[in-house]
Image: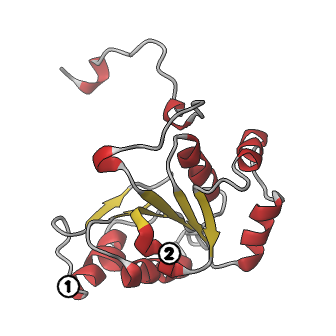
Amino acid sequence: MPLNTLPVTEGLRLGAAFETVPGRAAPAGPYAGAVAVVGLGYVGLPTALGLLAAGTEVIGIDVSAQRLAAIRAGNVDLLPSDLERLAEFDGDPRFTLTDDPAALARARTVLVCVPTPVDQHLAPDLRALRSAAATVVEHAVPGQLLMLTSTTYVGTTRDLLTGPLTERGFTVGEDIFVAFSPER
């Protein structure tokens, strides 16, 4: 059946998987485990809050001590619904905020959510992404899924994650896993 003729599921709402479900237990089975979100900006922080609402343990990592302090104080630029979620998860033991990259080793999944701004020629500035990817590779452990969510050009995942992981001795697709899921 051609893709454009697939039936639409009635009542399906985008984002439903991230809604808070009262009394919902943390995920179990093969998908259980903490998710580290590297970069707690306009993409990473709402992503972390959505994962928390779904019952997942989240390790939020940011290099900026000021950003972490602002998040702890609830003084961040979020949509009102996300500000409510942030207040809801204040003090929740499933939500760790840190600037210590060693915390990456505790995560089953690592989402890299750092900005890739473009210059006046629309060329991406990859400095933050290169730094974050190098840190993630340095602290990677077997069995993890490392997912790049920053929007960038074809080959960046290979250049910044799979290549360096192979150099570290990992076999990508066997003992560590890599994915690319850009946010735009």
Q: Which residue is mark 2?
A: 103
In the rendered image, which quarter is residue 98 located in? bottom right
- Up the image or down, 122 lies above or below 24; here it is below
Q: Is residue 45 visible?
A: yes
Out of 71 and 78, give the one closest to the viewer: 71
At mark 1, the secondary structure is loop
Residue drawn 77% across the image and 48% down it: 87
In the rendered image, which quarter is residue 29 located in? top left
Amino acid identity at mark 1: Gly
Residue drawn 62% across the image and 78% down it: 99
Count residues near mark 1 (Cα–Cα under 10 Å), then give few for <14, some for 14-19, many for 20+.
few
Label 2, label 1: how far apart the Cα atoms are: 21 Å
At mark 2, the secondary structure is helix
Q: Position of residue 168 (x, y in %)?
A: 25, 87
Q: Position of residue 4 (x, y in %)?
A: 30, 22
- Up the image or down, 139 lies above or below 5; here it is below
Q: Position of residue 48 (x, y in %)?
A: 58, 54
Q: Which residue is mark 1?
A: 169
Q: Position of residue 53 (x, y in %)?
A: 58, 41
Name the residue at the bottom extreme.
167
